[in-house]
């Protein structure tokens, strides 16, 4: 049999041959490097997908903040490291979102002096001849050089559409171009790349744009909000090297950041994980235990805000119930609670009607 040999392909053939291994020599890989165990593996590309205003960015920033602090993400192990968050759509409120996370972390005693979160509130382009991929690699390596050579484990691109420049997210060739640029960024930095992206008109069908996008990423997380309870669910819908179906449920808890120049309250939100007992309370299946503790030497003014496990509570009314007082609170979703001047705040239970009333 005659075989043709192209001398120009000789080196490539040798490289491919050296890359081939016998199946009998493989071993079990028990320990896979991760960023968030069970959710994000090191050196992969993932995306969080959901409709507008559902809480995608709050979730992505919450994940980034935990990794940058080296703190487990709501019970899930993380590998702490440098994190770059590209807030291409951040606007003026983005810094307030970060400040809210810092404030919530400090309230539970976390030391933020070693917070390893880097913010880039600027549009970037990751497609076409004007791609910023090489410039981003240079910027990341400059931070590594200037701050002790610490590795970046996560780079968040929020949102994907703002990073596509003039490219079309519905075109396969443009999605391919985007992925090539993301792979360049990933391979040069070693970071996991997390995209924040919008869902299509039918949110149940996942990411907006060409179907090749979902095929290209390693992990896809779908965000949905229950219109009745306002609870948000983040579910792993695709996982190339793991199980699907894991779900993180949370709500957006208002964080009070003080007053503006007009004396109005400035607020942002943080992710508040929802456990089974809290979900039961929101769905009206019966009262749960205390959600906060209060201590006042005198009756506080109406509108007083108290942070708690179900979100900030606002004092709506006070009744005198000799020899003391009863305070009535409401959360931002309309849930009602009650307390004395001191002690636990508990869900409000409507008194039973007296006979004949």
Image (cartoon, rainbow, N blue to C red):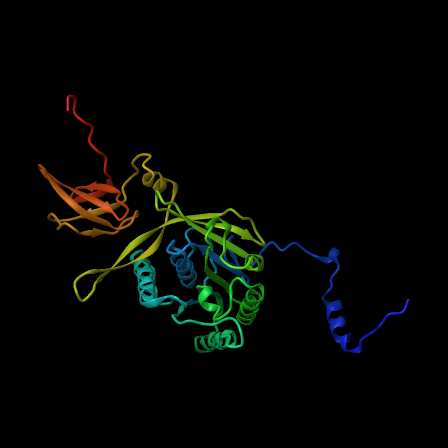
What's the residue at 42%, 71% (across, down)?
123
Residue placed farthest to the right in the image? 1
Residue 71 picture location, percent across and down:
41, 58
Residue at left offset 13%, top offset 50%: 300
| Front residue of 218 and 51 | 51
- Drawn side of residue 277 relative to residue 128, left or right: left
- Identify the residue at the far top of this view: 356
Q: Is 324 situated above or below 115?
A: above
In the image, residue 131 lies at what x, y percent? 51, 75
Residue 30: give x, y in percent of width and height.
Answer: 60, 54
Residue shown at 34%/43% (left/top)?
229
The residue at the point 20 percent across, 43 percent down is 343
Can you say which quadrant of the picture contains the C terminus? top left
**Front residue of 187 and 51:** 51
- Using the rendered view, name the quadrant where residue 289 is placed: top left
Answer whether residue 81 is visible to the viewer in this image.
Answer: no
Residue 327 in the image, given as x and y percentages of width and height: 16, 43
Q: How many marks?
A: 0
* Quadrant (top left/top right/bottom left/bottom right) for the N terminus: bottom right
Give the vertical position of 213 relative to 348 (above or below).
Answer: below
168 or 31: nearer the viewer? 168
Q: In the image, is residue 339 above or below residue 217?
A: above
- Residue 161 makes an appearance in the image: yes
């Amino acid at each position: 049999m005659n075989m043709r040999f192209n001398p120009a392909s000789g080196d490539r053939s040798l490289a491919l041959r050296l890359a081939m291994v016998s199946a009998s020599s493989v071993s079990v890989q028990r320990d896979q490097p991760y960023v968030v165990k069970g959710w994000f593996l090191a050196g992969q590309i993932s995306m969080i997908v959901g409709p507008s205003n559902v809480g995608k960015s709050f979730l992505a920033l919450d994940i980034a903040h935990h990794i940058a602090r080296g703190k487990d993400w709501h019970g899930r192990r993380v590998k702490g490291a440098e994190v770059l968050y590209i807030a291409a759509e951040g606007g003026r409120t983005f810094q307030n979102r970060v400040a809210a996370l810092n404030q919530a972390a400090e309230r539970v005693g976390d030391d933020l002096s070693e917070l390893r979160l880097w913010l880039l509130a600027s549009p970037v382009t990751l497609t076409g001849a004007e791609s910023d991929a090489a410039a981003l690699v240079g910027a990341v390596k400059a931070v590594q050089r200037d701050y002790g050579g610490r590795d970046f484990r996560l780079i968040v691109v929020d949102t994907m559409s703002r990073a596509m420049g003039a490219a079309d997210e519905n075109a396969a060739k443009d999605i391919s171009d985007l992925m090539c640029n993301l792979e360049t960024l990933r391979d040069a930095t070693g970071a996991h790349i997390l995209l924040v992206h919008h869902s299509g008109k039918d949110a149940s069908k996942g990411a907006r744009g060409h179907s090749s996008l979902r095929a290209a990423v390693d992990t896809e997380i779908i965000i949905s909000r229950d219109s009745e309870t306002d609870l948000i669910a983040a579910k792993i819908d695709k996982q190339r090297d793991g199980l699907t179906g894991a779900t993180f449920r949370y709500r957006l808890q208002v964080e009070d950041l003080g007053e503006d120049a007009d004396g109005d309250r400035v607020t942002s939100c943080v992710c508040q994980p929802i456990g089974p007992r809290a979900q039961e309370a929101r769905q009206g299946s019966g009262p749960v235990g205390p959600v906060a503790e209060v201590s006042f030497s005198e009756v506080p003014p109406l509108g007083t805000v108290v942070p708690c496990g179900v979100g900030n509570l606002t004092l709506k009314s006070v009744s005198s119930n000799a020899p003391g007082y009863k305070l009535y609170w409401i959360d931002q979703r309309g849930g009602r609670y009650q307390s004395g001047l001191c002690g636990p705040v508990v869900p409000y239970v409507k008194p039973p009607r007296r006979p004949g009333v």
